[in-house]
Amino acid sequence: MLLQNISRFETHNKIGELIKKVQGMESNTKGSNKECFFIDGYALLKTKSINEQELQQKMKIEKQLKEKGVNIVPTLEYQTDGIDDGFGFKKGYILQEIADGQPLHKSVNVQRMNETELKEVGTEYISTLKALQTERQEFYDKFVSDWIEITKAGLKVDPSKTSNFYYERGKQINFIDLDVGERFKGNIELETICAEMAVVIADGSKYYNSYFKENPQIMATTNEALSPIFKKLTESFVRQGLDKEQVKQILKGRFPEVNLDEKDGHKLEQTPEGLSQAQVERMQKDKEARERTEQLMEKFRTPKVETPSKLNRTTLKNDMKRNIIVRQIDKSEKEKKEIDYDKKRALFKRTGKGIQLSERENQLLEEMERQKAQAEEEYNRKQENRKGQGQLH
């Protein structure tokens, strides 16, 4: 039974029961001023720094966030010894549910690990990054929007520890150990959140800055693994209102070797909104087909004629081949025009809705108009050539 769904009186009784159970027990995890016990399906934190006013405010905000569907682990109850240390803090216990999933990355001190241990941690780290590669775009959209909602509500995400982020593969990332205070209220800087989130995903405060930078092979593997993750992260922040180039600059500033511009060795092409991937692939195939047919046309423009008898046979044969190739070119040009029409329709549809086109999209429109004019000119030239060839024969 979830404690947040029962009365405050019952949660108070539950925390009292668990406090008695942990007396004399070894904690599961330990920090500078608190330790955590995993007991009976709950996380019981023993701490020296409970500010009751802030904690009550935090519990209220967490409840609201949970009701909105934000992936956080809320505080269920707390209990103090009632003795103020003179700075507004008391010793006591805080009760939470155990977060679903596992810490995003293992918390370790790389300076105190031997080579074998470092390799094991590195292998696990790369495995986590590869799992993150497979997550859908919606996974990152939710991660970003949850972080923003938490910040808007007046809570603070602590990015310094990846153990504050519990990763459920194929599902979500849960936030724990949130801070509270009016000093955070309304301080929503997407650029800062973007930089902090990248560090969390890459665990840059540990592996990336220390051990991996001294090992080029592992560093290259890390950069390759981070590339598709950061591209999805970029898209999520673009959807939140940041400019794509701005996001790339933020990520490049922290991780300069991660490739954000290329895929499989080729530059990624930007396409206007409204075109499917299938249409883009079809455009590329049409382009390749036009190039092949142009190459074939070149072979038959100056046929070699040896005798008058061969002239008639060669002329007839070349006429037949030329007509076939011309039809192929006409068909390819028609299909290209259909795709261009779809592209322009998508762009004009956006302008009709009052959406301002980006500089890149305006350039695409201008380029399509130039291509259209060139295609019409080329078509007319070919028609004239055909008429001229017909008169010669």
Image (cartoon, rainbow, N blue to C red):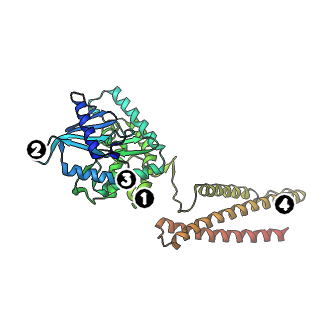
* Whole-percent x, y for residue 328 in the image: 74, 59
Q: Which secondary structure lies at badge 1? A: helix
Q: Which residue is mark 1?
A: 238
Question: In the image shown, does 29 or 198 lie closer to the viewer?
Answer: 29
Distance from Cα at disc 3 to Cα at disc 2: 35 Å
Residue found 55% across the figure and 62% down from its top: 274
* Whole-percent x, y for residue 340 in the image: 61, 65
Residue found 53% across the figure and 62% down from its top: 273
Q: Is tag 1's residue or tag 4's residue first in the polypeptide sequence?
A: 1
Is the residue marked by circle 1 packed among few (<14), some (14-19), or many (20+) residues within 10 Å?
A: some
> Of all residues shown, which one is farthest toward the left?
86
* Whole-percent x, y for residue 275 in the image: 57, 60
Q: Is tag 2's residue or tag 4's residue first in the polypeptide sequence?
A: 2
Q: Are marks 2 and 4 in contact (CB under 8 Å)?
A: no
Q: Which residue is mark 4?
A: 315
> Tag on residue 67?
3
